[in-house]
């Protein structure tokens, strides 16, 4: 009975101390680094065990070979030689396993060391804006959604309202009614606005897709649109996705949309030049999805495009990593950090622009939510630690309104009842807190 009481008291004490522990990003990184080091230690121990086994097999092989030399009977000699070969093969296998375990340990130690730098990085860097996409009609219809935005987010990306079909429904006839209300509302609440997007192959209006164009005609359309829109929002929209989703993973590496098909690959260069001329104060981004893993073929192509733009003197300031991923995403924050580092090394800013994480793994809810938390948190950490990462944006607030419209995917940081999920607390820690 007394023992039971002691165990209960100890459990209560542990609970209270862990609840009192501040949930800061740096505290979390310290414990995460510790866990990585422990795991690295396990791999190293496993590696040593494999090496011992390899040495034993090596000894057995040598003994068998020595015996074979001395044996006269051909049958026995053959058997001994076979046995020596078998032990040599086993020794090689154990050495290979040892190498693998050593590599794993080294990788974890490197990651732990990076985490060790987190505190310093957080102190050096001011908090970064946490943004979200907003659908204006949803926001107006749902005061709870509005409240969440005002309370927790510092930046807004209009989800569709700044796209070409919305702003220029007929050629040369611009409609800024909704976009203006939206942008001014955000600014009046002290929020930044990301402009999404000027030149995009999707959601083009009927007047563009229903006729044939010459290159010069379409370039004139592009120029007029970029100039009219950017001048209209000058001083209000500080940063634009000038070109969206131009790169494909396969084939010739381009998305074959109207802009590409009529103008050719230099439509990207032209769009950025028009944009800089229209608003020299705005930050100009190239934005794409599937470019989060540093060595994925699509990321490699995107880097090649951006590197061409930079070396050709095309005015580009940054790269947006959309980050529409799922719980099966085979990258962690460290790989995203490496992707960011490589773009930053070209002298560019980076931003996470549309993140959502689909929880369609089919596992238990708690495990799914935890994987989602790690994935969101990893990208947010990468962004906070990369000096050139300027903001972290999710593509919507609540699962009730995700663009996927499939409730089971639950890809956002607030659930369908507007309650924050574990991912939200992690992201908030990384982008905000010292
Ligand atoms: O405009 C019509 C409207 O007239 C009609 O009443 C309504 C009825 O559903 O549909 C409206 O069109 C919708 C459009 O958004 C504008 O609201 C389409 O159905 C809907 O499919 C469309 O989806 C958008 C999608 O882009 C289109 O490709 C999503 O809301 C938007 O979140 C999504 O955003 C893209 C980014 O721009 C680029 N990166 C990928 C991201 C997700 O696909």
Image (tube, helix red, strand yellow):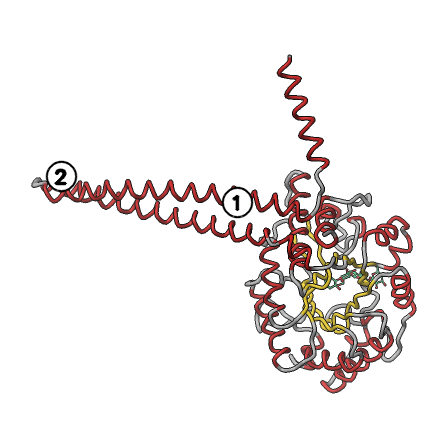
Specify the farthest residue to the left: 72
Residue 15 to residue 329: above or below: above
Distance from label 2 to label 1 (Cα)?
Answer: 50 Å
Tell me where residue 156 sits by quadrant: bottom right
Q: Which mark is residue 102?
A: none
- State the residue at coordinates (71%, 76%): 258
Q: Is residue 13 left or right of residue 237?
A: left
Q: Is residue 49 left or right of residue 201?
A: left
Residue 387 at x, y percent in the picture? 66, 63
Q: Residue 88, position in %: x, y? A: 26, 46
Judge by depth and name the residue closer to the eye, 202 or 429: 429
Check the picture and name the quadrant holding the N terminus.
top right
Q: Position of residue 105 (x, y in %)?
A: 47, 48
Q: Position of residue 309 (x, y in %)?
A: 64, 78
Q: Which secondary structure, mark 2?
A: helix
Q: Quadrant of ligand 1?
A: bottom right
Task: Examine the image and state in which quarter residue 31 appears.
Answer: top right
- Which residue is nearer to you in this view: 399 or 146? 146
Q: Which mark is residue 76?
A: 2
- Residue bearing the label numbered 1: 37
**What kind of element bears circle 1?**
helix
In terms of sequence position, does the residue under pointer 2 or pointer 1 come before the other? 1
Q: Is residue 199 above or below residue 157?
A: below
Mark 2 neighbour density, 10 Å: few (under 14) some (14–19) many (20 or more): few
Q: Nearer the viewer, mark 2 or mark 1?
A: 1
Tell me which residue sits at (12%, 40%) in the image. 75
Picture mark count: 2
């Amino acid at each position: 009975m007394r023992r039971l009481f002691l165990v209960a008291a100890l459990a209560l004490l542990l609970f209270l101390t862990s609840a009192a522990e501040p949930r800061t990003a740096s505290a979390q990184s310290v414990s995460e680094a510790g866990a990585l080091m422990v795991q690295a230690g396990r791999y190293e121990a496993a590696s040593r065990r494999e090496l011992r086994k390899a040495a034993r097999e090596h000894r057995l092989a040598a003994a068998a070979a020595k015996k074979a030399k001395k044996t006269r009977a051909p049958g026995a000699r053959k058997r001994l030689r076979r046995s020596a070969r078998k032990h040599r093969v086993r020794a090689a296998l154990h050495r290979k396993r040892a190498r693998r375990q050593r590599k794993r340990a080294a990788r974890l130690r490197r990651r732990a060391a990076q985490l060790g730098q987190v505190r310093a990085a957080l102190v050096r860097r001011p908090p970064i804006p946490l943004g979200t996409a907003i659908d204006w009609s949803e926001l107006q219809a749902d005061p709870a959604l509005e409240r969440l935005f005002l309370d927790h987010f510092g930046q807004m990306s209009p989800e569709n309202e700044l796209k070409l079909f919305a702003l220029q429904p007929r050629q040369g006839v611009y409609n800024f009614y909704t976009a203006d209300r939206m942008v001014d509302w955000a600014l009046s609440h002290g929020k930044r606005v990301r402009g999404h997007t000027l030149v995009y192959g999707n959601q083009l209006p009927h007047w563009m897709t229903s006729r044939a164009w010459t290159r010069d005609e379409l370039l004139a359309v592009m120029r007029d649109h970029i100039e009219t829109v950017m001048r209209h929002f000058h001083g209000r929209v500080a940063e634009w996705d000038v070109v969206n989703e131009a790169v494909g993973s396969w084939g010739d590496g381009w998305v074959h949309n109207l802009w590409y098909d009529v103008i050719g690959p230099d439509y990207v260069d032209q769009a950025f030049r028009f944009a800089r001329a229209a608003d020299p104060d705005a930050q100009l981004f190239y934005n794409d999805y599937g470019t989060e893993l540093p060595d994925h073929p699509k990321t490699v192509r995107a880097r090649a495009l951006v590197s061409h733009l930079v070396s050709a003197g095309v005015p580009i300031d940054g790269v947006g990593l959309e980050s529409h991923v799922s719980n099966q995403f085979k990258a962690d924050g460290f790989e995203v950090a490496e992707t960011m580092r490589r773009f930053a090394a070209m002298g560019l800013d980076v931003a996470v622009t549309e993140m959502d994480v689909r929880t369609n793994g089919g596992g238990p809810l708690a495990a799914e939510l935890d994987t989602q938390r790690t994935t969101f948190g990893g990208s947010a950490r990468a962004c906070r630690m990369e000096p050139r990462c300027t903001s972290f944006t999710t593509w919507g607030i609540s699962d009730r309104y995700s663009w996927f419209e499939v409730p089971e995917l639950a890809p956002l940081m607030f659930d369908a009842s507007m309650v924050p999920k574990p991912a939200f607390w992690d992201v908030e820690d990384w982008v905000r807190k010292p």
